[in-house]
Amino acid sequence: MTVGDPNSQKLRAGAIGDRRTSYDSFVISTLSPHLGAEVTGIDLSEPLSEDQYRDVHQVFADWGVVVFRDQILDREAHKAFGRNFGELHIHPMNHSHDSDAEILIVKTTAKSPYTAGDGWHSDVTCDEIPPLGSALYITETPECGGGDTLYANMGLAYDLLSPTMQAFLEGLTAVHDGAIPYVGNYNSTPPEGGYPRNEHPVITVHPITGRKILNVNSGFTSHIRGLRKWESEALLSSLYNFIATTPKLHCRVRWEPNTLTLWDNRCTQHHAVWDYYPHSRYGERVSIVSPQRPVGVS
């Protein structure tokens, strides 16, 4: 279906700040006053109607993390939903896989040496153009509970910094290196030429909302350019600790089988909590290519 560019839509005022809580084609319940909404009344296995397309883009812009429960999706339906937001991203670790390159398998068992995403991060910020967002579809959850994902609002994180710190960070650039998680943590074999390594502004501007975003994460950010090593490490450590230990920034998604969660990778971080050993969790993720590189403050 061809419809207007959602990037041209203006956010409409709602009951909580500038975030809507009422939509024409479905009902939501919010996970927190500033981040996260659970949608009911929509079947993602079917193509979106024009009204649904408009409302899904709006709730994504309004709430950043959007949960859809009781969805029965095959891979093609999962990918079709992701394509409502743009071209699908190929994950750097899929270079050696024979399966569908647009699907990232997220599987943890008792034999897993690690679980993907067990630490605060944004997805694949080592890319020159990191993904716009991701949609994770979980079909198996730990039988004894656990396995939630925490999300953090990086626009609110910026807002909570002092004006002095905000001004200082706005002039900085950070290096994001894929070898940190993919080789250092996951012990994967890199492709020829290695995993991506790129620089992005420490403070970015969200292309839809215009909000300033704190854009460093413990998963990929190696250092801040132009600072001495000890200065960079001290600053990044402080920011990571602030993100991880400030519950005001967070919402929590409790997974059930056949739940799909869509998040805005440009303004959130997430942490997949591995608290369910030796039980298993299985899901598949698609990510969406962003139309532009992260943009800093003018």
Image (tube, rainbow, N blue to C red):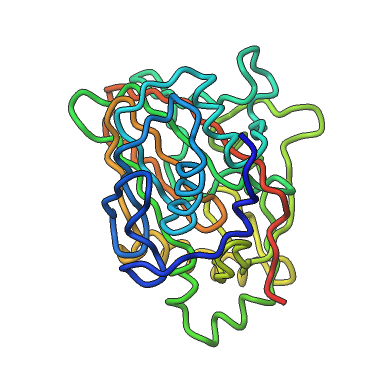
For the point 64% across and 49% down, the residue is 4
Farthest residue toward the left? 144
Relative to 190, is 206 above or below?
Answer: below
For the point 43% across and 52% down, the residue is 59
Does 23 sit left or right of 286 as displayed?
Answer: left
Locate the C terminus and report the quarter of the image it occupies: bottom right
Mark count: 0
In the depicted view, which residue is nearer to us: 91 or 9? 9
Does 146 sit left or right of 208 as displayed?
Answer: left
Quadrant of the rendered structure where residue 44 is?
Answer: top left
- Residue 63: x %, y % from top left: 41, 56
- Residue 89: x %, y % from top left: 65, 35
Does 80 sit left or right of 63 as displayed?
Answer: right
In the depicted view, which residue is nearer to us: 86 or 159? 86
- Residue 204: x %, y % from top left: 63, 66
Farthest residue toward the right? 193
- Residue 218: x %, y % from top left: 52, 53
In the depicted view, which residue is nearer to us: 18 or 283? 18
Farthest residue toward the bottom? 164
Does 141 sit left or right of 8 as displayed?
Answer: left
In the depicted view, which residue is nearer to us: 272 or 260? 260
Relative to 120, is 174 above or below?
Answer: below
